[in-house]
Image (cartoon, grey):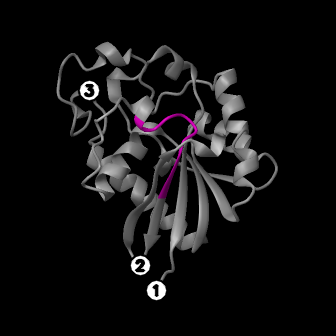
Amino acid sequence: MLKKTTFYLVRHGQTLFNQRKWIQGWTDSPLTEQGIQTAKRLYQPLQNISFIVCVSSTSERAVDTAYCMVSDRMEVRTYKGLKEINFGRIEAMPIATAFEGKDHRLGYTEWGGERKIDAVKRYLDTLEQIACQYGPGEILVSSHGTIIRELIAHIDPNFDAYVKPLAELVPNCSITKIGYENGRWSVEGYPDTSYLE
């Protein structure tokens, strides 16, 4: 029986696409100077937590954020399964106009992207693999905003994933805590920026 593994999911630092309010998904854009500096501010408070490993999405913005957070403190291991939701043809488009008034609550297959439930399953399967490989203990994850929002909504049915815009609900460099124990998932902490204070 596995003991509890706690994942600290960090949304990557601000990127050029975040600044322009464009959709990213599997498309990448570099961290802005603000994004780099904010991610570096996590280094000090996260030193007090005994992480057994730092893992990251393979997207450059997440990998760069991970190295800003851990510097030379630990190795960063990357996993494709931790990538953001694939938005298909609407990636690199302005958020305000990309959906053309169409309902995208189930996902983005209409534009050649992923269903939300498939992205969540991919992500949770990857976290479970990481928990089995490295856990139990505390694991730092450099991640993405939309998938974090959808994970919380999947685990906690009382969570209103659309009560605020994504940038307010899951801010850049916020930390969300997800627990995994004996095959069960729990939300241990909602997106939190107090580590930056």
Marks 2 & 1, CB-CB < 8 Å contact? yes
What residue did someone put label 2 on? 182
What residue did someone put label 1 on? 1
Tag 1: Cα neighbours inside 10 Å, few (<14), some, or many (≥20)?
few
Q: Which mark is residue 111?
A: 3
Q: Secondary structure at mark 2?
A: loop
* Coordinates of residue 170 in the picture (x, y in percent): 45, 38
On screen, residue 194 versus residue 185, left or right, reads right
> Closer to the camera: disc 3 or disc 1?
1
Depth check: give the residue in front, 121 or 167.
167
Which residue is located at x 30 percent, y 54 percent? 154
Give the mark, 3 or 2, whose residue is nearer the N terminus.
Answer: 3
Q: Determine the image quadrant of residue 10.
A: top right
Q: Secondary structure at mark 1?
A: loop
* Coordinates of residue 75 in the picture (x, y in percent): 74, 55
Q: Which amino acid type corresponds to the residue marked 3 in the rendered image?
A: Trp
Q: Which amino acid type corresponds to the residue marked 2 in the rendered image?
A: Asn
Q: Is residue 185 above or below residue 19?
A: below
Q: Determine the image quadrant of residue 69.
A: top right
Can you see residue 88?
A: yes
Which residue is located at x 45 percent, y 69 percent? 180
**Alpha-carbon span between mark 3 and mark 2:** 37 Å
Give the mark, 2 or 1, whose residue is nearer the N terminus.
Answer: 1
Which residue is located at x 21 percent, y 40 percent? 106
Tag 3: Cα neighbours inside 10 Å, few (<14), some, or many (≥20)?
some
Looking at the rendered image, the quarter that the C terminus falls into is top right
Q: Which residues are magenta?
A: 169-177
Tag 2: Cα neighbours inside 10 Å, few (<14), some, or many (≥20)?
few
